[in-house]
Structures are given as structure tokens and as C-alpha cells.
């Protein structure tokens, strides 16, 4: 779990140090802008951007009941971020599994991708789709409804 927070923590630390230096030299506005920019970058690279993750067994159980797709992701992945942002509020309709928190989920992703932990991997009706187009995933949600 700690691994997911290393990059956001470093971004906040660097932003804070830079903002402090600017603040002490009298650049109040620039310091505030820098701290805001680094705070936004930290948020974009944190697990907070994504819906709450569940374990792969729970995701499979829920998907079997409701038919919704399962998304395997990891913090800091720009393709996962792109998928999450482009899905908007629809992202909460999917079952999200963080492969850094769930070794069984990581193993399933490796199995589906020839030994690689390539994310996002979306499971729809038991079939894996690696780094699918967000519009396609949104279309799968329309089928589910």
C-alpha cells in the first residue's frame, strides 16, 4: 500500500520545498501557484482519483452477479488515469482492482497479458481487454444497463 503513495508524497514534498523557498524570497503568489500545481499533480498520481478498490475475488463475485466489467489498475499509471478521467461518473459503475494491493489480481493480469502486468486490463464477460479505448468501455456500460 505504501508504494502507491511514494510518488504523490515526493511531489508534495518537492512542491512544498519549492514553495517555501519562493515564499521566503517574497514570491507569495508564485509560491501559492507552485504548491497548487504540485498538489494537483500529487492528486492525479494518487489512489484518491480512483473509486475504492476491492479484491479480485470480490470483484469476480460481484461481476458474476451484476455483469459489470472489472478494471485492473495501479497508481501512477497514465493509461489508467486516462481511462478513469474519460469515464467520468461512469467509473463508479465498474469494479476496480488495484494490482499493487492485490497479488491475486496482479497474477490474473499477468496471466491475461503473457506474463506482463499491463494495465488497465478490463475483464468483460470473462474476456480480458488490455488498455481498451475509454469509449469502448463506456459502450460496455451501456450494454450492461
Image (cartoon, helix red, strand yellow):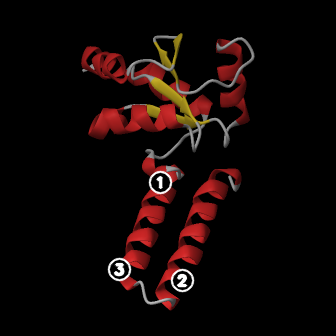
Please name whichever residue, 72 or 37, is drawn nearer the observer in this view of the structure: 37
Please name whichever residue, 127 or 74, is drawn nearer the observer in this view of the structure: 74
Q: Name the element at disc 2.
A: helix
Residue 132 lies, in percent from the top left, at 45, 18
In the picture, the disc for residue 135 is: none
Please name whichever residue, 121 or 96, is drawn nearer the observer in this view of the structure: 121
Vertical comparison of 55 with 44: above or below: above
Q: CA distance from mark 1 to mark 2?
A: 25 Å
Vertical comparison of 44 with 125: above or below: below
Q: Residue at x 61, y 29 (%)?
A: 57
Camera-nearest label, 1 or 2: 2
Please name whichever residue, 20 or 84, is drawn nearer the observer in this view of the structure: 20
Sooner in the amino-acid sequence: mark 3 or mark 2: 2
Q: Residue at x 32, y 33 (%)?
A: 87
Q: Quadrant of residue 130?
A: top right
Residue 36 lies, in percent from the top left, at 40, 68
Q: CA distance from mark 3 to mark 2?
A: 12 Å
Sooner in the amino-acid sequence: mark 1 or mark 3: 3
Please give the residue where the numbered disc 3 appears in the rendered image: 29
Residue 115 lies, in percent from the top left, at 75, 16
In the picture, the disc for residue 20 is: 2
Amino acid at each position: 500500500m505504501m508504494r502507491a503513495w511514494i510518488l504523490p508524497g515526493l511531489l508534495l514534498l518537492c512542491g512544498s520545498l519549492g514553495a517555501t523557498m519562493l515564499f521566503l524570497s517574497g514570491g507569495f503568489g508564485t509560491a501559492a501557484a507552485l504548491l497548487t500545481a504540485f498538489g494537483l499533480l500529487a492528486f492525479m498520481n494518487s489512489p484518491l482519483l480512483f473509486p475504492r478498490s476491492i479484491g479480485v475475488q470480490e470483484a469476480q463475485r460481484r461481476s458474476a452477479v451484476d455483469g459489470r466489467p472489472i478494471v485492473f489498475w495501479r497508481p501512477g499509471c497514465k493509461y489508467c488515469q486516462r481511462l478513469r478521467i474519460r469515464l467520468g461518473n461512469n467509473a463508479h459503475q465498474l469494479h476496480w482492482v488495484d494490482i499493487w494491493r492485490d497479488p491475486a489480481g496482479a497474477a490474473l493480469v499477468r496471466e491475461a497479458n503473457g506474463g506482463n502486468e499491463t494495465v488497465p486490463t478490463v475483464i468483460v464477460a470473462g474476456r480480458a481487454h488490455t488498455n481498451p479505448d475509454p469509449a469502448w468501455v463506456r459502450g460496455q456500460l451501456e450494454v450492461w444497463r
